[in-house]
Amino acid sequence: MTLDSAKADQWTSVILFALGAAMLVGGYTMDRLEIRQIHPASIPGLVPIILGAAMMLCSGLLFWSARQRAGDARSTDGAPVVEGSVKNLAFAAGYSVLYAIGLVGWLPFWLATAIYISVFYVHFSWQADATNRSRLLHAGLGLAFGIVGAFAIATLFEHGFLVRLP
Amino acid sequence: MDALASLSLAFQQFATGEMLFHVVWATLLGIFVGSLPGLTATMGVALLTTLTYTLDRDAAILVLICMYVGAIYGGSRSAILLNIPGTPASAATSLDGYPLARSGRAGYAMALATAGSAIGTMVGILLLVLLAPPLAEAALRFGSFEFFWLAVFGIIISGQLTGGISPLKGYIAGLLGLMVAMVGSEGIHAHIRFNFGIQELNGGIGLIPAMVGAFGFAEVLTVMWRRKAKVVDKPAERDRIMPKLVDLWRYKFTIGRSGVIGTMVGIIPGVGEDIGAWASYAAARRTSKERDQFGKGSLEGLTAAETGNSAVVPGALIPALTLAVPGSAPAAVLIAALFIHGVRPGPMIMIEQPEFVYSVAVMLVFATIAIAVFGLFLTRFFVLVLKVPREILMPLVFTLCVIGPYALTQRTFEIWVMVGFGLVGFLLRQMNYPMAPLVLGIILGALLDKSLRRGLTLSDGDLTPFFTRPISATFVIIIALSIALGIPAVRRAISRALDSLLRRQKEGMTDG
């Protein structure tokens, strides 16, 4: 299943339908502020109810059109993913999330950033067939790049924009 | 006369050493950002917004506008040399730019793209100066009923035009944006909605962290996922890097038409530069004498695409300034930046700060002059820029995505929001959901919510004024037509009806 396929659309439509239903119910059960004697047409849940219903309708239409597409011989299901490397994507996503919500705040910002930049650079430019010496040089270059990059960004925000870094 | 005086005053105000320095670095940075596939104008403006908190109002807005103009222009570099649009706005540029580069005319293609961009922006600036004041005046007649329909119109049109073959996905993206806008304290009774017990959500989800995530982090992931592209090597030795005036004169109608089309597309809420470029390109191909050359290295096609996408920039600022409704995704960030710097865009702008629209026009003129100068004289340098490896650039970009939103409120919660929007934004993009309606939804959610409930309160729960007031009725008709035309069965039925009508007419003429 590719991300832009009829099957993916069917699954998404189910999730979106649930989201719409949740918003509709959330809006309907929301406090109507009767105690404040507000106009009944200005209840805070009104627009969420409408949006929830609209999302349920649109997701229903998406499901229906995806089913039609799935039955169509020209459907793109099963077509190879041409965009790129899933391994690269998984590393970039996982490592970036780890940095943003794990390292930042746990380590001083400059240190977390230096580690992030260095490892990112070394990982994506690593050459498996290189000699040990050139690998060592490469890792050193990555470390230097990380330290310089982190120092520049931290200094800019801390002293230039007076931000108390995390 | 007032307009000319305001423009001349604005020129004097911005022709200082400090402001020109800002023009130079921000435009260069914009071209750099736009040149690199994966870094878009929206991302550049969003990230730079976080770096302009400490600048004064005029300098901050100048910097952001230069980034916007520079990035839209810069996208043509990678479109021509890599066949990968640096920004989505340059997708049409690559159709003719890349074949020109492969035939050894990369320098000339870039020169022509520069001239087209500069002229397109100038056409847009002229229309901005002419159209913004009357539009703001007309918007003063808008009440809650009209603003409600304006918000709905923005989401529907944006969804329709950016959703590609499936407007449904555009509508869904818009609805998702509106849903995000429902989180936090609402604007009439200050009741807190959908905070799930998380105190940080009481104030709602910030536009800047959401946009930095959806356009920054999502793009970092996209770039790292895709395979590396190869730059078309050096331009041929006899290749020109200055546009020939004779070529510009030959395409004068194409340039003028593309400038107007681009600006008009810009005025439509949430549509953006890519649609401006495609619409101009399609119009040029329909009317061109050399239409068989389109897609194979047509100078006219390249000029139309570049003029069209650049003219969208001033066009997108017209509704952004006068209605607080962005014409494109970068303009949405600009609206947020305007609020941060104490400018209140909307119908009152021509009353509260009448000089500001002219200041923006002058900022655009400076940015245009800068892209023309840099574009023509730094061609070789920008070829080098394209060779910066992604593994050097992307970790730096992501670090800025993390620290930028944090700097606004100094809460780590903003980083989580950015990460969440980045991951969801990446998935949605891969599934062909356009991002512009989502952004527009976040921006217009509060307006739609407040206008509907305020209108209903004014009419004591009666829906009739939403359909009977003249401006509201016009919006309703346009919205209904747009939705109907988005349904394939309706489009097919109309086309069949037109065909049979034409056939009957033809038969009638033959019989006669």
Image (cartoon, coloured by chain):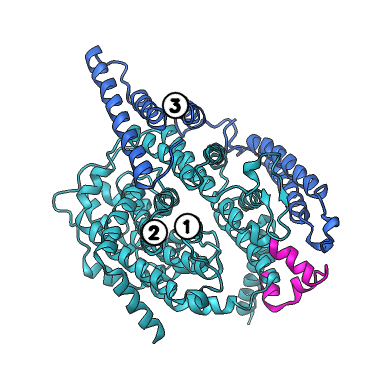
Left or right placement of residue B4 versus residue B139 in this view: left
Left or right placement of residue B34 versus residue B153 in this view: left
Q: Position of residue B334 (x, y in %)?
A: 47, 58
Q: Amino acid at mark 2?
A: Ala
Residue at the spot 42% in from the left edge and 29% down from the top edge: A108
In the rendered image of the structure, the colour used to display chain A is: blue
Q: CA distance from mark 1 to mark 2?
A: 8 Å
Residue at the spot 60% in from the left edge and 47% down from the top edge: B205
Mark 1 lies on a secondary structure that is helix
Query: Which circle marks residue A107 in the picture?
Result: 3
- The magenta segment is B450-475
Chain for disc number 3: A
Query: What secondary structure characterizes most of the magenta part?
Result: helix
- Pointer 1 with pointer 3, Cβ within 8 A: no
Q: CA distance from mark 1 to mark 3?
A: 31 Å
Read off the residue under disc 2.
B60
Residue at the spot 38% in from the left edge and 43% down from the top edge: A157
